[in-house]
Image (cartoon, grey):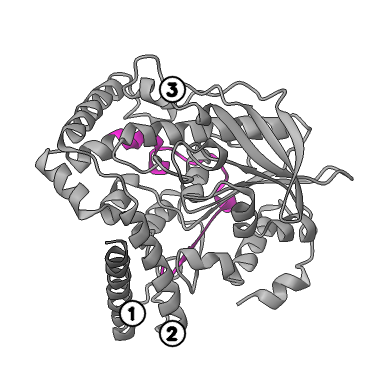
Amino acid sequence: MVASAAEALRAQAGRRTASFMADAWRGAEVLGIGHHPAPRASLGTAAKVAVDEAFRSLMIALTDLPSASEMRLVKHELAEAGAYFDDRGWLDDAASYHLRPPELTSPTVRPRHSWGTEFEHLQFVSGYEPDADEPGRDRWMSYRKPRTAHAWVMRHRDKPRPWLVCVHGFRMGFPLADFHAFRANWLHHELGLNLVFPVLPMHGERKIGKRSGDGFFSYQFMDTVHAEAQAIWDLRRVIDWIRAQGVEDIGVYGVSLGGYTAALLAGFERDLTCVIAGMPTVCFSTLLQDHAPKRLLGMAERTKLGWDMVSRVLQVISPLAVQPQVPHENRYLYAGAADRVVPREHVLDLWRHWGKPQLQWFEGSHLSFTWESVINDVVYRSLRSSGLLPGRRRPEAVRSQAA
């Protein structure tokens, strides 16, 4: 049974990869600068796409499926939430759904190391709670681990330095993965930045299931609302902690789910030096429809759970529902031309909502960004042009790795 299921997943990933590459070979239209270029058809691109498709198939296989009765309860909760949000004006003014958290004054900070990397473990009581009568509140408050916030800190002790807040993607949230994905040693040692890696709710040491990220994207859509709202709450507290140290130059860099979160955060923190959103999704509802198992989609249809209802409730945590406070010239986007996880329309929707700032496409897929050398160049240019790296020459390492 297990072997046959694995074979089915491999076959599905293979079919989708072949279909994608066939389209690429026929030649897709190359749009203008800032739009989506056609990926080059090559064996290298095919391998990158195959990695995305394998990941996508695995995520589908690991998705928990509700019963019909559970889906009806979800539908009822969403209807209640929609009415509750509308009554308080949050659907018309999503920013007002998010309260400003208290300053973070006395977190616990202790030394740690992971695979030879020395860092500090920042820990504090989050303090986030949904509104008193908000649908789904009791379930969210029953999760104990998300109540404690965690972050990994890499800082220099010689003199004040700019800080970069690195917001991880789905299924990440532990040091080895976060440091690797963000090229932490390069950012910290080569570029001289102080870094902080907040752990998103339901991830890493805050997970509520067997795997990091379990529950964040599920049929319990109000859990997704509360997880993302708490993520913004916790990030703002971490930024306040940095500012309390007399620091003014703070940037935020997120990838994938972290790109979504960074884009949403940009609607609340006007004093950020820059925001970089890498491969950002912007609509959880359409993303779930793209990647959800057919059985889940069929059950939603049978119970008449409309996706417009889901989108309406998720609007309070949508980056497209808040106006960015970060200056236009300091907003940056990048995405993979062959991404099979985040549809290109998500990136373009945020690009347009942000007033068409700098957008860089790289020749790769969603998961391949971890080994794409050109990402260093994209990130470096963003940090430099925003002023987070004032007066720095472009490092030799970046010149040699640029595509």
Cα separation between marks 1 and 3: 46 Å
Q: Is residue 263 left or right of residue 309?
A: right
Cα separation between marks 1 and 2: 9 Å
Q: Does residue 136 appear in the picture of this structure?
A: yes
When the figure is inspected, residue 50 is found, relative to residue 125, above or below; the finding is below
- The residue that mark 2 highlights is 43
When the figure is inspected, residue 38 is found, relative to residue 370, above or below; the finding is below
Q: Earlier in the sequence, mark 1 or mark 2?
A: 1
How many residues crowd mark 1 within 10 Å: few (<14), some (14–19), many (20+)? Answer: many
Q: Does residue 382 appear in the picture of this structure?
A: no
Label 1: element kind: helix
Q: Earlier in the sequence, mark 3 or mark 2?
A: 2
Q: Nearer the viewer, mark 3 or mark 2?
A: 3
Q: Earlier in the sequence, mark 1 or mark 3?
A: 1
How many residues crowd mark 3 within 10 Å: few (<14), some (14–19), many (20+)? Answer: some
Residue shown at 59% from the left, 47% from the top: 174
Label 3: element kind: helix
Q: Nearer the viewer, mark 1 or mark 3?
A: 3
Q: Is residue 293 left or right of residue 392?
A: left
How many residues crowd mark 2 within 10 Å: few (<14), some (14–19), many (20+)? Answer: few
Number of dots carrying numbers = 3
The label on residue 382 is none
Amino acid at pointer 2: Leu
Amino acid at pointer 1: Met
Magenta residues span 313-339
- The residue that mark 3 highlights is 141
The spot of residue 4 in percent (x, y) is 27, 67
The spot of residue 41 in percent (x, y) is 39, 83
Residue extending furthest toward the front: 1
